[in-house]
Image (cartoon, coloured by chain):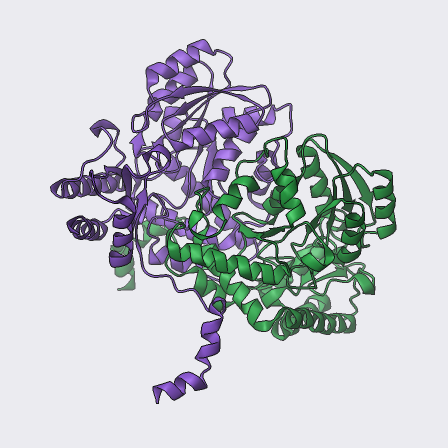
Chain colours: A green, B purple
Amino acid sequence: MLGTLHQSMSFDVILESPVLSTFYPPLRTLMGPGPSDVSPRVLAASARPTIGHLDPLFVGLMDDVKRLLQFAFQTQNELTIPLSAPGSAGMEAAFVNILEPGDKAIVCQNGVFGGRMKENVERCGATAVMVQDRWSDPVDPSKVEEAINANPDAKVLAFVHAETSTGVRSDAEQLCRMAKAQGILTIVDAVTSLAGIDLQVDAWGADVVYSGTQKCLSGLPGISPITFSSDAVAAITARKHTVQSWFLDMNLIMGYWGEGAKRAYHHTAPVNAIYALHEALLMLEEEGLEASFQRHEINHVALVDGLSRLGLDLAVALPWRLPQLNAVVIPQGKDDAKIRSHLLNEFNLEIGAGLGDLAGKQWRIGLMGSSSHQVNINQCLAAFESALAR
Amino acid sequence: MLGTLHQSMSFDVILESPVLSTFYPPLRTLMGPGPSDVSPRVLAASARPTIGHLDPLFVGLMDDVKRLLQFAFQTQNELTIPLSAPGSAGMEAAFVNILEPGDKAIVCQNGVFGGRMKENVERCGATAVMVQDRWSDPVDPSKVEEAINANPDAKVLAFVHAETSTGVRSDAEQLCRMAKAQGILTIVDAVTSLAGIDLQVDAWGADVVYSGTQKCLSGLPGISPITFSSDAVAAITARKHTVQSWFLDMNLIMGYWGEGAKRAYHHTAPVNAIYALHEALLMLEEEGLEASFQRHEINHVALVDGLSRLGLDLAVALPWRLPQLNAVVIPQGKDDAKIRSHLLNEFNLEIGAGLGDLAGKQWRIGLMGSSSHQVNINQCLAAFESALAR
């Protein structure tokens, strides 16, 4: 009987075309370097009916999102918006708008993303003066001071606040103050720091700061919040060369994300992803920034404590550890890929592999945004206990 | 009693902070130039739990999406992927990857988006030879032939298949054949054409073709499907200059969207938007391309018929009308903005205003993807009848 039904509904044909079926993802616990767990509230927001990107109600929502991002970035910067592309486009937007051909930028590298900054500088026709630090170490302010003194003509100091590849925090406040004192603009990668650790854009005098939605905000992946100080905007409007990217040209984007009714068409905003970001930012505002930082810190301590009872050590020295991204030394003789597969297949738990030189040597365990939660910590510790015992 | 409840629930405070509330969009009927109506199936897909962008299951989904996009584009091109940004980034990706400084491109302009192509060409340090046609007319192949003959050194012929600003279809097949005969690469804007009218990438010999998800695919706004022929890939790999955009550099993106396990990290894909695109493409495959084109055509005829009974004429000559985007002449003495407000506020119906020179002179009524439906046509005609009678 079931066989007949099977035939009559042509399941054979359907089974021959596996493409022809809806994708039902498993319920993972996301403790890698991002995306982090997205809450049901944010997922529900993303599924609300799409409206036009020039609809007056959407324009109002854009204004709300800008205000909420100002809150998250701790800034009054008027030009504080979500770019319609991932964090790597946020990085590119920072460099292509500020740098012109022939400019010089001091770039600090202590992980993967400092290297990506160098790529961006050079693709702008500018020169990158590199300040290198060992991966797993923070950016060394004394080296930066030397570089600033040796390059008084530098236009930009660029560095990563929270290095996603190593789990290291650098002292953004000090670096921004040093640059400011010399009239140098700062470009700060806050992809992993925003909402996870303190980030005071105005108080620290940072000029261009970009982030991503899929880390400590726990919005949907794909959007890059970015903010520009008035000095940064002045540099953009004083440019001699057209920005090389049309899509990321802030002169055009300012018209699109400008105030209310005067909005000029630039591109179609990712409407539903903005719904999701709005909801994620509301949740952050409800919790409060300070409370969010504390939660990230408390859960970090609990995780490290549990890992240490399993014999696992962190790779980063205590003062520079990111609570939202824990770099763990892979013990001698343990098989990196096998253990991560075990965690994923037996526990639906995703953690991150090492990037670049750290591949095979470290794991990256994220406790970002909605993933920074007791339930996740317990799941993670139980999963590691099982994996290490094999 | 109700007053007391009101007080006790602190509604006053909530009302004072309008930011602090979830955004519930109204249920609009989207008949503008995009986004189009997104079906409940696609919205539901976008709200499924986020998984990691390097998760083996997501990597499998990426392969399915590539195959479904090949189907939609009618191509075997291996490099057929969804870019993690809107259609305007798709346009930029086409130009920055193919053009190098000093190159020459013939650019056809018969609306807003041909002008945007020129901007992109020039930002690549290349020269744009413009072929101008009147807005509301198609690209004139005889002018293009002249331009090709006068510029045998041109590397690229670029044109818009379906001009979103005017509702005009150009003869992409003929234009691609003319370019091919001279060994010139084509860059084709198919933002509004894909899935709405016939678009045969391989049979017509188009080289780079990009689109958007928010038009006739009725996915969520924010993603740009793009396909590159083997000639286009050869041009990219033979470049002398680095691609000026890191985010859109296809040499890097090929590694990310390459086959299966060898995938290299580039950026974090917009996971949930890809779920939505996958579902939208499944719906297209279920319906069939030919059936989708026919549906767009039949509904277009029905709309035009109804509009004509209301005394409204189309702005585009019969052979070049896009079924998915109907440019309507605003009758003498009728107030553009007032009528569109009436449609939106009284009928929850969005239609498009005229762009550029056509502002105030034309409306753009979209029948794209899920919006190409009898229910929408009836709603639109009833709304116009009401608005015009006032």
Which is more toward the observer, B62 or B249? B249
**Which percent across, then down, holds residue B29?**
29, 54
**Is residue A237 something one can see in this rendering?**
yes
Relative horizontal placement of residue B49, taking residue B237 as reference (left or right)? left
Which is more toward the observer, A208 or B261? A208
Residue found farthest to the left: B309
Which is more toward the observer, B320 or B207? B320
- Where on the picture, by quarter, is residue A307? bottom right
Work out whether B92 lies above or below B11: above
Residue found farthest to the front: B333
**Which percent across, then down, holds residue B259?**
55, 41
| Quadrant housing the N terminus of chain B | bottom left
**Which percent across, then down, holds residue A257?**
50, 49
Relative horizontal placement of residue B97, taking residue A59 as reference (left or right)? right
**Which percent across, then down, holds residue A42?**
49, 64
**Is residue B85 something one can see in this rendering?**
no
Which is more toward the observer, B70 or B34? B34
Q: Which residue appears at 25% of the width and 53% of the height?
A: B342
- Where on the picture, by quarter, is residue B241? top right
Q: Which residue appears at 20% of the width and 29% of the height?
A: B318
Q: Which residue appears at 41% of the width and 43% of the height?
A: B68
